[in-house]
Image: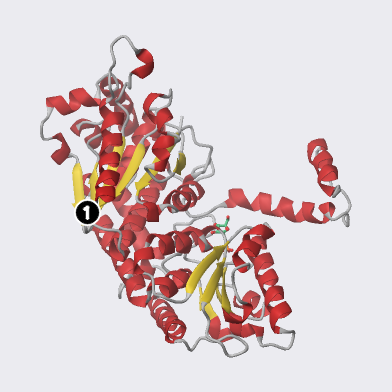
Amino acid sequence: MSALTRSSAWQALAAHQRRIAPSSLGALFAADPSRAAAFTLETGEILLDYSKHRIDAEAMRLLAALAAQARLQDWIAKMFSGDPINSTEERAALHVALRSRDAAFPQGRDVMAEVRTARERLRGFVGEAHGGTLKGANGRAITDVVNIGIGGSDLGPRMVTRALRAFRKPAPRLHFVSNIDPADLDATLADLAPETTFFIVASKTFTTAETLENARRARTWLAAALGGAADLSRHFAAVTANVAGAAALGVPQERVFPMWDWVGGRYSVWSAVGLAVALAVGVDAFEELLEGAHAMDTHFRTEPIERNIPAVLALLEIWYVNFFGAQTRAVIPYCEDLRDLPAYLQQLEMESNGKRVDRDGSEVDYDTAPIVWGATGTPSQHSFHQLLHQGTRLVPVDFIVTQASNPSGARTALAANALAQAAALAFGNPVPGAAHRTLPGNRPSSTIVLKRLAPRALGQLIAMYEHKVFVEGIIWNINSFDQWGVEHGKTLARTLTPLLLESGRPADLDSSTLTLLARLRKHD
Ligand code: F6P
């Protein structure tokens, strides 16, 4: 048994779960008319109603004790002071510095001067693009920008740009390409004119195969249209920690924006990886996004565990994963512009906490990150909600709802649907004599209300999830900031690529892979 599962805090939670499991959410609400108020927290533009969870005050007290046992407050202090908490890579995890105004980060070198310089350079570049002075090789103003990146160099800017559609500047138009499947880039380029198209190659390492291949193909596309003699470098910027890699692709030095080893890819939207966002909505809106995240950082740093929104969300996740056996959590934004949020959170949560050994390298004897999935409501109601209501699995849900600034019939219906789903999950619908029509209820959900879908609120929302992931990692005693699990697949793919082209010698491969390779080599 691990120290965690042996601990008195863990054992007390297991005992309490056995006490509370038979009670229904309906009964818990009936017993306490002020339950909603007791289990609602608010900060800035975010409200969290967690009353529809299978908890009582004692459960929350015991969960907070678990966090205290893990010395959560000390770890928060370590992260914010730049300690190398990413132990396997001996790096700090200082994404909070990217949205800080002037804080010093005493444990590492102070990064704020570099952060401020990068922000100023970003402002200058976006000014060029919006002022019409960003021009391609033949002197025409850029109208379209394609962000080429993958994982954290794609999902963040893509999700935020989509979420802030209402704030978009008229030009340039933004596009996102991540897949090494040529269909992705080809479909994007089909509608674009080479002379007015610009590419941001976003890659912290500048070694990621998908991104480098797409960047090379983009260059070939430009060269074919503009001629080999054209100055193609005028069509490229890069965001990377690998300056030499960007130079090798022909990106001019003044258009290489920095990334740092103390920022993880999935935490990088606040850096120049957010260049696409700033181009889409302007630097002022981008800075509001940072301020929103900074406000959540302050909340996270200063509020006690019981009133700390990211901590409470993390503790609820632990409650279901480790004490109720939940395997997944659904994220359902009732907001079309948050369509890409589930995919973003999949990387943030599963790449961070999809780990099976603890910080000392010992295999854990408890579950870590659940599978995160989801889609926007209301379309999701007509696909997978059936399972949520009547299936055999316990799936806690995050409902994300925005307050409408000018309510219309459709917007009101949208919010009504979100509330209806949360209530139906919690309280069910018994139909006597008709088991097939009965909704058992007692299915938990959080309702997260944003005052409006605007940069500041979005910044708070994203930072809230980042810190939730952090708290879980601390309690599960895992390193949330590495991702060694994805490396081996990359290496294998590099080995197999020449074999598919018939130019390599079969390595020591299993019969299944060899047979499939032979099949995929046949092109007729
Ligand atoms: O998928 C693994 C990963 O390393 C992610 O962590 C990262 O966000 C992504 O690849 C892209 O990496 P890079 O920005 O270095 O191209």
Q: Estimate how packed mark 1 is, as few (under 14), some (14 to 19) or many (20 or more) residues with alpha carbons within 10 Å.
A: few
Quadrant of residue 302 within the rendered picture: bottom left
User: x, y percentage for residue 398?
Assistant: 34, 42
Left or right of 210? Residue 452 is left
Question: What is the x, y in percent for residue 370?
Answer: 45, 38
Going by the numbered disc 1, the residue's amino acid type is Pro
Q: In front here: 1 or 515?
A: 515
Q: Is residue 425 above or below residue 125?
A: above
Q: In this rendering, does residue 488 appear at all?
A: yes
Q: Percent position (x, y) of residue 419?
A: 26, 39
The number of callouts visible is: 1
Residue at x 36%, y 35% (from the top left corner): 396
Q: Looking at the rendering, which quadrant does residue 13 occupy?
A: top left
Q: Is residue 276 above or below residue 3?
A: below
Image position of 217 (left or right of 132)? right
Q: Is residue 520 left or right of residue 22?
A: right
Identified at 35% across, 57% down, the residue is 463
Q: Residue drawn at (35%, 53%), measured in percent from left and top? A: 467
395 relative to 171, above or below? above
Q: Quadrant of residue 113?
A: bottom left
Question: Circle 1 sits on which residue?
Answer: 407
Q: Residue at x 47, y 61 (%)?
A: 158
Q: Nearer the viewer, residue 445 or 113?
A: 445
Q: Residue furthest top?
A: 433
Front residue of 14/118: it is 118
Q: How is the protein colored in the picture?
A: secondary structure
- Give x and y (percent) for residue 292: 29, 64
Among all residues in the image, which is located at the extreme left?
Answer: 33
Compared to residue 470, the image places residue 275 above or below, namely below
What secondary structure is marked by label 1? loop
| Ligand 1 quarter of the rendering | bottom right
